[in-house]
Image (cartoon, helix red, strand yellow):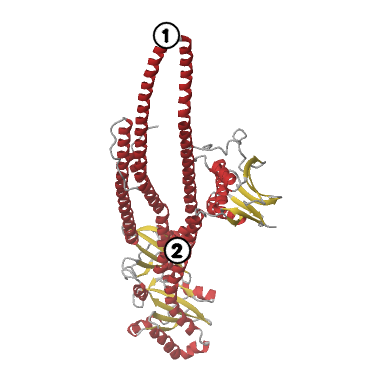
Amino acid sequence: MPVKTLRKILFANASLAIFLPLALVLLFGWLWLVPMINRGLSDQQHQLAQAIAGQVESFLAVPESHVSTIASLHPNHLSPENSKHVQHVIDAAVKVVPHLRSMYLVSAVGQVEAVGVSDDQQHVRQDLLGLDMTSNDLYRRARAARSPQWSETFLSVVGSGLSVAVAVPSGPRVLIGEINLAVLSTFLQKISVSKERQLYVIDRRGQIIADQSGRYTAQQINLSNNALIQSSIEHGADQSGTFELNGTVMVGSVQKIEAMGWWVLVAEPRATAYHQVWVAIGISVAGLLATALTVLTVAILFSHRLATQIEALEVHSRRVADDEASTCWPGSDIAELDSLAASLEKMAQTLHERAQVLEHEVAERQKAEEEIHLNAALLMEEVSVRQRTEEALRVQQLQLEALNSSLEERVQEELGRNREKDALMIQQSRLAAMGEMLSNIAHQWRQPLNELGITIQMIRYDYDDGLLDRRKIDTFIESCMTTIQYMSNTINDFRDFFKQDRVPRLFDLETSVQSAVGLVRASLQHAGISMVVELDRRCMVMGHSNELSQAVLNIINNARDALVERQVADPTIRIASRIDGNYVRITISDNAGGVAPEIIDKIFDPYFTTRHKAQGTGLGLYMTRMILESKLGGQIMVVNTSEGAQFQIVIPCGQETVVCEP
């Protein structure tokens, strides 16, 4: 495994933690936000086209209503005998309705009996009287259908402008009203809200009838070769999309006017339509990049400071290891590093003192040995046998003394190692639990954060649609505060889980187990795992509620990891409790297939895990057993069922630990 410096590791991790979320945000914006903007723009134009189509239809309904009103008069009022009265009526109608260019009353045999025109067109009245209309398509359709009919657009002989006619049967006669379409362009100009946005009214043949500027009215410009218009005419349905008009790429929507079979086209240049969107996206991206660079700079500065302090400790430790003169250890403004420096300094002093004591003992031993050798030489001549015996006894005595003197020291060293191991295991267990809690908080917060994001986005659309008022704002604030309160309560639940009471108390077993289940419920739902809880409500336990919750939580986490790793269909975790004589028995089972027989006796050992070191510490079940046995006076065992593993927790009743209610 390649070894890297702390600076490189901190810089790489900081860069990954900052730029990976930024890349995900940009990808999310491209894959989701841009299509959503396109749909929003298309819907907006489609709604505008619908509104304009309705207004145009209402605009043309006025002259149709007047023609129908006159046509509904009693046949005697429109008979040739009342020609002056008929002429007065239709002349008055033309003057009252500005849209009407002229009006004809056609007899049952197809002859024009009366003509109504404006004052400046009186000279064409005689030319139109007696005109034969039997071959006119509009006249024939109105006679055949016996209902109002609209004509195609045409250039009128009265006023030489683009017109459309409506024919309404009146008994055996037909009353035809000719409508000036130039007024329609003026009407479109009044309802237009933007110079860049272009409004067109197009007839059934694809010809422009009117536009907001009036430039194309009566010029017989045909847009039937336009892909968007062609598709709408062919399929008879509304369309939205992108097309090219006069060399400019446009974004538009086509809406049908049902009464006349015409179409309304609302379009604007694509660059104009997306200008504000791209400006907003550009500002957002620039803000994200600036934020990422700022955070990265702060992370680099903090990493540099941390690495510098750790390197100073490493250099000083190497000097002590090389038996160089010990100077003051470097301090730190980080509490943990400062405590580590103090501990290393104390350890170095202890080693130095022990080395001095050892040197003193060696010197004394050498002096004693010299005296012994001198005495042995003096006594050698006296009794050689006694000398050998005493020498043997002396050697044995020295060995025994050495053994006795080192025994206590070795016992203390072993106890120290055990305490360090216990502290390390507890710390690792706490860190692992903290990591699980953070993961669970992330699952609990994901849905509320999505709701906040959607609520905040909707306020923009309500503002654009003109729906934003005080009631909407109050509703928005209430919804956001409800979601934020839920997230705050989630934090309180996780904070209360880590609180530890100093004095054992009576607590409800069901509440303790439900507390553990509640902490991981969102995580289980995210993984698609069902949780079934069936608890006996008659038992109260003496001790610390959080300790039992932690034990249950460790077992649930192990079951969840097994179900996710093995990808079990319909994954389920079941928790049940019942009172069995003088004991309360809690069973936690899953359907993950069980524990391998060769390792089932080892799963409660410290540091035993079947997962990679980066994914587990092997302390969860060991700490669970320690809590149940040393804190609650209970036992835990595991067996394999037909579906998976089943953990059984047994706590004795009738003692100081547990009090069971009848």
Number of on-image labels:
2
Is 207 in front, or is 368? 368
Distance of mark 2 from mark 1, alpha carbons?
108 Å
Instruction: Report x, y in % for residue 427.
Output: 46, 44
User: Which mark, residue 522?
Assistant: none
Quarter occupied by the N terminus: top left
Left or right position of 621 against 449 = right
Q: Which amino acid does label 1 sit on?
A: Glu
Q: What element carries label 1?
A: loop
User: Which mark, residue 455?
Assistant: 2
* Mark 1 neighbour class, 10 Å CA radius: few under 14, some 14 to 19, many 20 or more: few
Q: Which amino acid does label 2 sit on?
A: Thr
Quarter occupied by the C terminus: bottom right
Which callout, 2 or 1, points to the residue nearer the camera?
A: 1
Instruction: Report x, y in % for residue 618.
Output: 52, 39
The answer to which of marks 2 and 1 sits earlier in the sequence is 1
Which residue: 44% across, 10% down? 382
User: Which mark, residue 381?
Assistant: 1
Is 325 in front, or is 253? 325
Does the image show residue 135? no
Instruction: Report x, y in % for residue 660.
Output: 67, 55
The correct choice, above or below, for 198 with respect to 660 in the image is: below
Is 20 in front, or is 203? 20
